[in-house]
Image: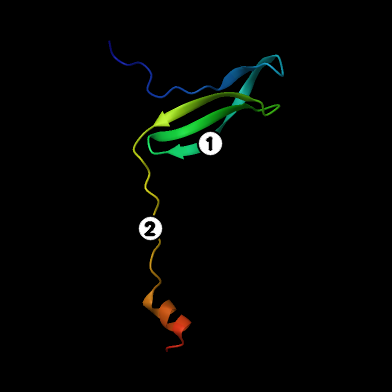
Amino acid sequence: MTQQFGKFTASELYCPKCKISQPVRERLLLVLPTGELHEFVCARCSTSLGKRTVTGPAVAPGSPKPPRASAARRLLGFK
């Protein structure tokens, strides 16, 4: 059988505090080596309603760029 849905995410969830289905916002909680952990919160009262893990390749932090030669000369007092 072919896959019908690629990525599926919630737009509304039942909120026990509001006692009704409410729109949700998705917040990024953690960036893990295996993916990202997201949290669904109620758009009205900000109650946590659920979590989801998005798997993917690990994101390597960018390496800082070395300063340009002209900037380094100015810092050292050379012209």
Q: What residue type is labelled 2?
A: Ser
Q: Do the residues labelled 1 and 2 touch (CB within 8 Å)?
A: no
The tag earlier along the polypeptide, 1 or 2, is 1
User: What residue is pinned by disc 2?
Assistant: 63
Residue at 66% from the left image edge and 26% from the top image edge: 47
| Image spot of residue 37 (x, y percent) | 48, 32
The total of numbered circles placed on residues is: 2
Colour convention: rainbow
Residue at 55% from the left image edge and 29% from the top image edge: 39
Mark 1 falls on what kind of element? Answer: strand
| Image spot of residue 53 (x, y percent) | 45, 28
Classify the position of the N terminus by image quarter.
Answer: top left
Q: Which amino acid does label 1 sit on?
A: Leu
Q: Which residue lies furthest to the left in this view?
A: 1
> Spatial distance from mark 1 to mark 2, Cα to Cα?
23 Å
Check disc 1: other Cα within 10 Å, few if <14, some if 14-19, many if 20+: few
- Establish if 64 lies above or below 72: above
- Establish if 11 lies above or below 28: above
Residue at 40% from the left image edge and 51% from the top image edge: 61
Q: In which quarter of the view is residue 32 placed?
A: top left
Classify the position of the C terminus by image quarter.
Answer: bottom left
Q: Residue 29 carries which label?
A: 1
Mark 2 falls on what kind of element? Answer: loop
Q: Residue furthest bottom?
A: 79
